[in-house]
Image: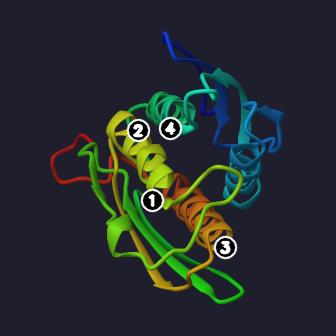
Amino acid sequence: MREATVERATAETWVRLRLGLDGPTGGKVDTGLPFLDHMLLQLQRHGRFLLEVEARGDLEVDVHHLVEDVGIALGMALKEALGDGVGLERYAEAFAPMDETLVLCVLDLSGRPHLEFRPEAWPVVGEAGGVNHYHLREFLRGLVNHGRLTLHLRLLSGREAHHVVEASFKALARALHKATRRTGEGVPSTKGVL
């Protein structure tokens, strides 16, 4: 079973996160920020992962620290759970629609962190539960840098913040599910390592 539990504590946040890639799925999520909980449950459900998250942050200051640090913890757990990458599918893409919104996520579990995401180019209006598409960038940056993956996220249509952020999490979940599957033998790289 590919699984990892990480704990991260700073002066601003505390996060304990458990990720299982091979089932069973489900798990309790409680960050103290209901919209972030809702997004993590989307990741859990559509990624078909075991994802348990308990977190607290300085929400009286802003949601930024908590959202970012949960992304960092998820990246740390993903990297640990993937191990040496033997048998991984490695590459994946997924579209996710939500009403007027359509998002594309393409990723590579390459060992090379890179995030291609430009929220300033997205014509999104408002926020949802205190979270907006700029906070999404901080979550993804933490995930990418600590999970050591390349991730491209594109908004193909949509403007409403809740739909845009939720479709983004769903597309990410579906792409992660595909990329983390074991479909072969050996490390999927001509270098022999990821």
Give the amino acid at mark 3: His
Alpha carbons under labels 1 and 2: distance apart: 22 Å
Which residue is labeled 1 in the image?
89
Label 4: element kind: helix
Question: Above or below — where is 105 with respect to 15?
Answer: below
Ranked by sequence position, the earlier of labels 1 and 3 is 1
Give the amino acid at mark 4: His
Looking at the picture, how far across and down is residue 107, in whole percent? 39, 62
Alpha carbons under labels 4 and 3: distance apart: 19 Å
Label 3: element kind: helix
Which residue is labeled 2 in the image?
142
Which residue is labeled 4 in the image?
64
Rendered-image quadrant of the N terminus: top right
Ranked by sequence position, the earlier of labels 4 and 1 is 4
Q: Which of 61 and 133 is in front in this view?
A: 61
- Decide: few, some or many residues near mark 2? Use Cα within 10 Å; few <14, some 14-19, many ≥20: many
Ranked by sequence position, the earlier of labels 3 and 2 is 2
Looking at the picture, how far across and down is residue 53, in whole percent? 71, 30
